[in-house]
Amino acid sequence: MILVIGSGIAGLTAALVAHEHGSEVTIVTKAGIADANTTRAQGGIAAVVSPEDAHAAHAADTLRAAGGLADPAAVDALVGDGSDLIARLILDYGVAFDRDADGGLSRGLEAAHSFPRILHAGGDATGAEIERALVAAVRASGIEVREHTMLRDLLTRNGAVIGARLMEPTGRTVDAAAEAVILATGGCGRVYSRTTNSDVATGEGIAAAIRAGARVRDMEFVQFHPTVLAAGESFLISEAVRGEGAVLLDEQGHRFAFDAHPDGELAPRDVVARAIADAMAGQGGRPAMLDATGIGTATLTRRFPTIDATLRERGLDWAREPIPVAPAAHYLMGGVATDLDGATSLPGLYAAGESARTGVHGANRLASNSLLEGGVFGARAARAAVRFARTTTADRTASPDSSADLSQNARICRSPAPEPFDRSALGRLMWERAGLARDAAGLDLAAAAIGGWLSALAEPMTPESVEDLGLLTVAREIVRAARVRAESVGAHFRSDTARVTAAA
């Protein structure tokens, strides 16, 4: 049996591919099956689907945005498999991408892409449409789905993963044996006070892998989306809006993005996010303005119906006046280290999607490569897990050596925390000390506070307390990696050291 933990594009694709290869599959997801960050993805999915485009061009754009730290082999796998993934999404799973007047796939342009290759569905509801189609395919397949059940820990024997300890909403735990486990639990955006992520993005999947002994990499690289509505609850304003012609203005009406990069609003995300932060700092912390009035009411309503409706619900008419925006935590480029087939450092454990560090993003993710990565590497991980499951001879029915002690890694540092732990306090700390700009003093403070909270944390007995441990564990790894990397590159900006290495 193959256990897939998570139900975004990575998890659902992995489950479907493993099932198609003849394996028994169970999906475990801590909320409803469709309650994944995939559902919130607006902009689209990047892939080469036109004869005028080329895999080499998509790869070059990805490598350029990554600040020199992406793995070229992983990037080649991403873009090379990407076209086939799109075909499968359409033909096998029924994803209804938007079409142009001639019936071809409608393609948009986003930041740092050299060619319009962003496919979208429902205008700005791409993730929701992909999730809908994959969920329907899973339901039709008969794959077992265990909703509202979360990963408490991975089970190991002799250094290999042999299953998972799961927790139900009541706090009751149950062990599930498996020939292979595919981790697709997403990222950890909720570690920051300002984020585009849903409530499920609390990092406990990565944290469980760490406790089991899996290697993680590149945890310092957290992408901050430049344009998130700065009025009320955080709401992402898709990069595609700038691709359609929206511009960024400060309070004086100056189009400041070109001061930071020749590509202006379509520069890589890390550059634009810092440019907005700098503009905000120069005007007392007040948000920048995104001016989409030149696009026109008809286009805004047709191309971005979800954004348009949400803004109007909040009393904003972006067709007539600019809207306030500011950066927010968006995507973790690091995670559990894998090879090109999703295999981690632990036999029997695979990872895909945002919980994995595949090497395709380096220091800065290219816009709309996230859904692509989830689908491509979810399928790769599934095929590898099936092969492993067919060849492994381990006895999965005997008791494991132990499940990882959820508290043992917590008590590494006994530094006092500045205040009692709660999620809002952690979010503020990470935003201020390990956010868009970091320095040694702030990172030291963050490390001490997180260590103090971890040392005082009680043994998690409820889903909420397992999430708390996940948030603190992943926060510790982000800060630890950020302290080690003294130079600035991509999304990791050290204000106290060298100048940024441009991801241009």
Image (tube, rainbow, N blue to C red):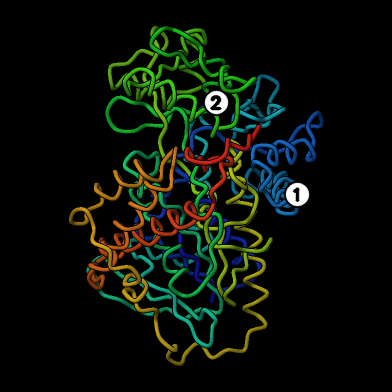
- Tell me where residue 230 sits by quadrant: top left
Image coordinates of residue 104 in percent, x first then y, are 70, 27
Residue drawn where x is 39% and y is 50% of the image? 443
Residue at image position (61%, 66%) is: 18
**Numbered tag placed on residue 76 in the rendering:** 1
The circle on residue 105 is: none
Amino acid identity at mark 1: Asp
Figure check: 55 above or below 355: above
In the displayed structure, does residue 343 sit left or right of residue 211? Answer: right
Residue placed furthest toward the left? 420
User: Which corner quadrant holds the C terminus?
Assistant: top right
The disc labelled 2 sits on which kind of residue? Ala
Q: Label for residue 240? A: 2
Residue drawn at x 49%, y 8% is: 296
Q: Which is nearer the eye, 206 or 430?
A: 430
Q: CA distance from mark 2 to mark 1?
A: 24 Å
Percent coordinates x, y for residue 378 in the rendering = 60, 58
**In-front residue for pair 240/473:** 473
CB atoms of marks 2 and 1 within 8 Å: no
Q: Secondary structure at mark 1?
A: helix
Residue nearest the observer in this picture, 376 or 460? 460
Q: Is residue 123 above or below residue 445?
A: above
